[in-house]
Image (cartoon, rainbow, N blue to C red):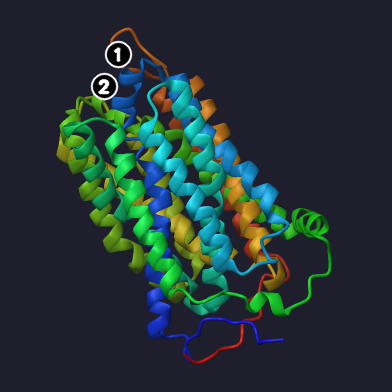
């Protein structure tokens, strides 16, 4: 029996090896593709709703359809997530994700787009959990703040590169073109991963004690895991409640021209690209939970300001948006790094799959709830958007409390690290 393959880990926790740098970049690209697919629905909402003659409730359903199908997919695959080479699992779901994205680009009706989002979610919803499992397998806890910071810059890159380009393509032709372009780019990315990435199979060397369903059962019944899952669900609420309606809110309520939206996302993305790695380094240096607290305070403050804005200038919206996303990143990066130490090595895949599933399901619920809170006034403006802000503030405070308890709970130390190998 051959020794399981595991890409090399650095001999020092202070620096990345050459292969690790490549892996981080590759994982960031995959995150970029998946996040952009979701992020595009928000700015394109102002175009899709009139094009398909649908209202906020139907558009909220389109957004939540992805989330619900992704959540279901995560639960169905969680029991098997630790039984295969993580590279093979990644490529399988990435291929399905590309097919779903292509379908979105070809959709001509509300029903067709809804089905396309369901298919995309079934495959795309698992990719993020596999990415996290791979990054946890290959990097020690002392480096994960920087790793998560670099991977999460994919979120910012989707704003800097993807969303402005997507909006330009949509304004130049129609809203289908950005999805078609994403599908083409995704094919080249998948081929590169197939060619360059080494198998990730070190976790297979440890015997599995249970059947896939018992493996799933033991993962979802671990008390510390449940606390982490609950925190994940609450942190997801903000994005899924605010972002789907952000473009319509900016255009209809704040008086921002539709053609100026790419500038908002461009500048905001550049700020988060700049601050993302710094946040990750700060989490490793000063403490992940301390950075999370600061991020929570900043994000709550900016959400309250953002959801209470009246007609405003483009520069002011950019400043508010930038600070709000820096606050969000200052929560998500240290949270992901901190929670990566929770599962044992034989349950990383299932833990991350379930976590991603809960994230998507809670996000789907949040989108539906937001769609019912937010209404379209007779003047074309969104009503009760400030109420959504209050809900986000409440969930943020509860998430802070849960994470405080989680990081103080027994057994939350570093998990055993995989053996290092040489190239």
Measured as percent of width and height from the top left, residue 232 is found at 58, 50
Classify mark 2: helix, strand or loop.
helix
The answer to whether residue 391 of the structure is visible from this angle is: no
Dot 2: few (<14), some (14–19), or many (≥20) neighbours within 10 Å? Answer: some
Measured as percent of width and height from the top left, residue 379 is found at 28, 10
Image quadrant holding the N terminus, namely bottom right
* Residues tagged 1 and 2 counted as in contact (Cβ below 8 A): yes
Q: Is residue 161 above or below residue 347?
A: above
Residue at image location 47% in from the left, 37% down from the top: 240
Image quarter for residue 419? bottom right
Residue at image location 55% in from the left, 41% down from the top: 395
Q: CA distance from mark 1 to mark 2?
A: 6 Å
Measured as percent of width and height from the top left, residue 312 is found at 19, 30
Dot 1: few (<14), some (14–19), or many (≥20) neighbours within 10 Å? Answer: few
Please name whichever residue, 223 or 185, is drawn nearer the observer in this view of the structure: 185
- Precedes in sequence: disc 1 or disc 2: 2
The answer to whether residue 246 of the structure is visible from this angle is: yes
Residue at image location 35% in from the left, 21% down from the top: 49
Q: Is residue 274 above or below residue 24?
A: above
Residue at image location 51% in from the left, 37% down from the top: 66
Please name whichever residue, 179 or 326, is drawn nearer the observer in this view of the structure: 179
Q: Which mark is residue 224?
A: none
Q: Which mark is residue 252?
A: 2
Q: Which mark is residue 380?
A: 1
């Amino acid at each position: 029996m051959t020794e399981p393959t595991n890409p090399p880990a650095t001999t020092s926790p202070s620096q990345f090896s050459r292969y690790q740098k490549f892996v981080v970049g590759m994982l960031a690209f995959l995150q970029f593709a998946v996040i952009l697919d979701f992020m595009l629905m928000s700015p394109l909402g102002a175009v899709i709703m009139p094009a398909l003659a649908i209202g906020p409730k139907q558009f909220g359903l389109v957004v939540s359809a992805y989330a619900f199908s992704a959540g279901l997919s995560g639960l169905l695959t969680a029991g098997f997530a630790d039984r295969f080479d993580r590279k093979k699992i990644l490529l399988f779901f990435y291929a399905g994700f590309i097919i779903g994205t292509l379908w979105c680009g070809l959709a001509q009706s509300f029903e067709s787009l809804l089905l396309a989002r369901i298919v995309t979610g079934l495959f795309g919803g698992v990719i993020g959990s596999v990415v996290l499992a791979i990054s946890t397998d290959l990097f020690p806890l002392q480096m994960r703040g920087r790793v998560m910071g670099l991977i999460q810059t994919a979120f910012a890159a989707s704003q800097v590169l993807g969303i402005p380009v997507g909006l330009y393509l949509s304004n130049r032709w129609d809203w289908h073109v950005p999805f078609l372009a994403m599908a083409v780019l995704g094919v080249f990315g998948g081929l590169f991963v197939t060619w360059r990435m080494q198998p990730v199979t070190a976790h297979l060397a440890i015997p599995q004690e249970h059947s896939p369903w018992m493996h799933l059962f033991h993962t979802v019944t671990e008390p510390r895991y449940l606390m982490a899952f609950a925190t994940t669900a609450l942190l997801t609420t903000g994005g899924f409640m605010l972002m789907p309606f952000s473009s319509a809110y900016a255009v209809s309520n704040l008086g921002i021209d539709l053609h100026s939206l790419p500038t908002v996302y461009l500048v905001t993305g550049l700020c988060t690209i700049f601050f993302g790695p710094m946040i990750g380094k700060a989490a490793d240096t000063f403490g992940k939970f301390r950075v999370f607290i600061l991020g929570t305070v900043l994000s709550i403050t900016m959400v309250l300001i953002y959801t209470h804005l009246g007609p405003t200038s483009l520069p002011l919206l950019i400043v508010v948006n930038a600070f709000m996303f820096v606050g969000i990143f200052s929560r998500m990066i240290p949270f992901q790094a901190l929670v990566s130490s929770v599962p044992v090595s034989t349950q990383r895949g299932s833990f991350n799959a379930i976590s991603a599933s809960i994230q998507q399901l809670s996000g789907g619920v949040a989108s539906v709830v937001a769609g019912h809170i937010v209404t379209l006034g007779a003047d074309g403006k969104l009503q009760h958007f400030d109420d959504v802000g209050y809900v986000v503030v409440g969930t943020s405070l509860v998430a802070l409390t849960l994470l405080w308890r989680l990081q103080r709970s027994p057994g939350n130390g570093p998990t055993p690290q995989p053996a290092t190998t040489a190239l």
